[in-house]
Amino acid sequence: MRFLAAKTFPSQMVSPKMMVLTLAALLALALASPSFAATKEMKVFKDWGVYRGDTDAGRICYMSSVPKSLKGDYDRNNRGETRVFVTHGPGKADRNVVSVLAGYKYKKQSDVTFAIDGKDNTLFTMNNRAWALPDQDAQLVTKMKRGNKLIVTGISSRGNKTIDEYSLSGFTKAKQFMDSLCK
């Protein structure tokens, strides 16, 4: 849906970026909700783990990996958890959502380079996360299935450049398992 209700915002369109931000906020609320059962690790496939949680809104499944290497001129003690995610749910409309948890707050209105085997893709940022636009998600997942290495490059709110290298080993099997777990 590209337009909000005419009564509320008659001349404003909802951009894909805003749609993703809204979905991200809803996912964050679902994860923080008391009705959210503890996330359970279901299975690990080489460098990728698959997880599941159930909410009142439905099941959420995601797969995630941590970087093999972290590069950049910054104090490692000032950086939090760093991961790449592919998420399903709740609901059938929210599938293959690609995001990055940076471990720091991104520079405002900056982009992240999400390079799969040297081919650059751009993600937008919001606080400490980077997101693909909805029309990019499926394409990125396909590229990740075929790829070997993912490099995520971002700029922190302090102006520090970070380069995180991920292995895509196990990605395809983890994705197949997640798809069967969260239909």
Image (spheres, grey):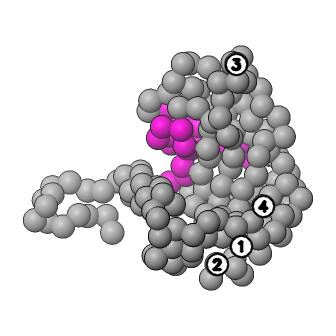
Mark pair 4, 3: CA separation:
27 Å
Query: What residue type is disc 4 on?
Result: Gly
Magenta includes 123? Answer: yes
Q: Residue 104's image quarter?
A: top right
Q: From the image, which quarter does the N terminus lie in?
A: bottom left
- Mark 4 and mark 2 lie on one chain; the one further toward the N terminus is 4
Q: Residues within 10 Å of mark 3 (few under 14, many from 20)?
A: few
Residue for point 13% across, 61% down: 8
On the image, the x and y values in percent for residue 138 come to 62, 64
In this image, 181 relative to 14: left or right? right
Relative image position of residue 89 (x, y in whole percent): 54, 71
Amino acid under label 1?
Met
> Dot 2: within a 10 Å radius of its alpha carbon, few (fewer than 14), some, or many (20 or more) residues?
some
Return the residue at label 3. 75
Residues rendered magenta in the picture: 110-135
Circles 2, 1 touching at the beta carbon (< 8 Å): yes
Give the quadrant of the C terminus: bottom right
Q: Which residue carries the number 2 mark? A: 182
Mark 2: amino acid: Cys
